[in-house]
Image (cartoon, helix red, strand yellow):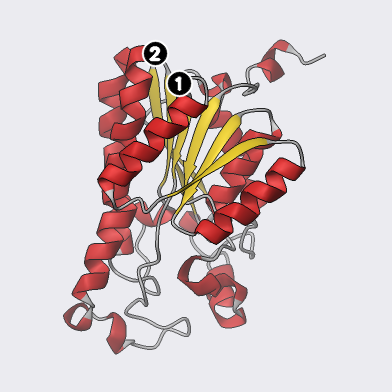
Amino acid sequence: MLTPTLQTFDVRGLSCAVTGAASGIGLAYAEVMAEHGALVTLMDRDAAGLDRACARLAEAGARVRAEAVDVTERAALYAAFERTAVAQGERLDVVFANAGIDAGPGFLTPDHQRNPEGALETLDEAHWDAVIATNLGSVFTTLRAAVRRMKPQGSGSIIVTTSNAAIINEAIVGTPYMPAKAGAASLVRQAAMELARHGIRVNAIAPGPFVTNIAGGRLRHAADRRAFETRVPQHRVAETDEIKPLALFLASRASSYVTGAQIVIDGGQMLGRTD
């Protein structure tokens, strides 16, 4: 039997949606919610990846469904959320606004040489626009889609994936990434202030270096991996399973008095190097 404290982590039967869920951190969010009995819709523009993820989770007994959607297409995203709510009991209890793209090369290479491709004067403007639209604009759209269902029901938890790059700056990460993530973090705080009276909590998870497919899976490459490992006091990058407990905490009643928070999970990277 679960203790009263452990019972607050119970998400069985909750209606949940996760954007950017075909792989990486988004898939980890979907997995932990599905593994603990939530009804989960995985959203991503990668239809094939969605099918594989949903098939694997369903085979394990999870109640999951897929919505292939580009989060930068507002009308399509609103429609996907509406279908999700209808399919999952006419409600939305937990939404992870996770979708994001990489921001291209930084103005320094991993071995700290100047990189002309990442310099301000040569930064690709179309890529800047795409990063802002995906990593910040889609968070706004996702919040709106979630609130349309959560306000009438008087409850809900929204979790936004920001980054420790919302707080610190990275020379080897493309310049658009930092302002996009900082904007998302500010939006979390603003939304939390507005929505608290409606029983809706809004928080952020700010990961440091995790092994995902973003930026072409750069942290699977030895040189890039070492560049991050040397700046993390734990001297390693994280696997996506390590974010699951934090996601479950913020999605559940265990975090009932937490809103407007940005919780950093980065192995101490923000503390600086220890050697």
Residue 212: x and y in percent read 56, 62
Earlier residue among tags 2 and 1: 1
Rate crowding at label 1 as few (under 14), some (14 to 19) or many (20 or more) other CA atoms within 10 Å.
many
| Occupied quadrant, residue 230 | bottom right
Separation of residues labelled 2 and 1 (CA atoms): 8 Å
Q: Residue furthest right?
A: 1
On screen, residue 12 above or below 128: above
Disc on res. 91: 1
For the point 35% across and 76% down, which residue is it? 106
Rendered-image quadrant of the C terminus: bottom right
| Occupied quadrant, residue 171 | bottom left
Report the number of discs: 2
Q: Which residue is nearer to you in this view: 133 or 106?
A: 133
Name the residue tied to disc 2. Answer: 153
Residue 68: x and y in percent read 46, 51
For the point 70% across and 11% down, which residue is it? 4
Q: Which residue is nearer to you in this view: 110 or 14?
A: 14
The residue mark sitting in front, 2 or 1, is 1
Q: Is residue 261 visible?
A: no
Q: Amino acid at mark 2?
A: Gln
Residue 2: x and y in percent read 77, 16
Mark 1 and mark 2 in contact (Cβ < 8 Å)?
yes
On screen, residue 36 above or below 197: below
Residue 233: x and y in percent read 59, 60
Q: Which residue is nearer to you in this view: 241 or 86?
A: 86
Disc on res. 253: none
Name the side, left or right, on which 218 lies relative to 182.
right
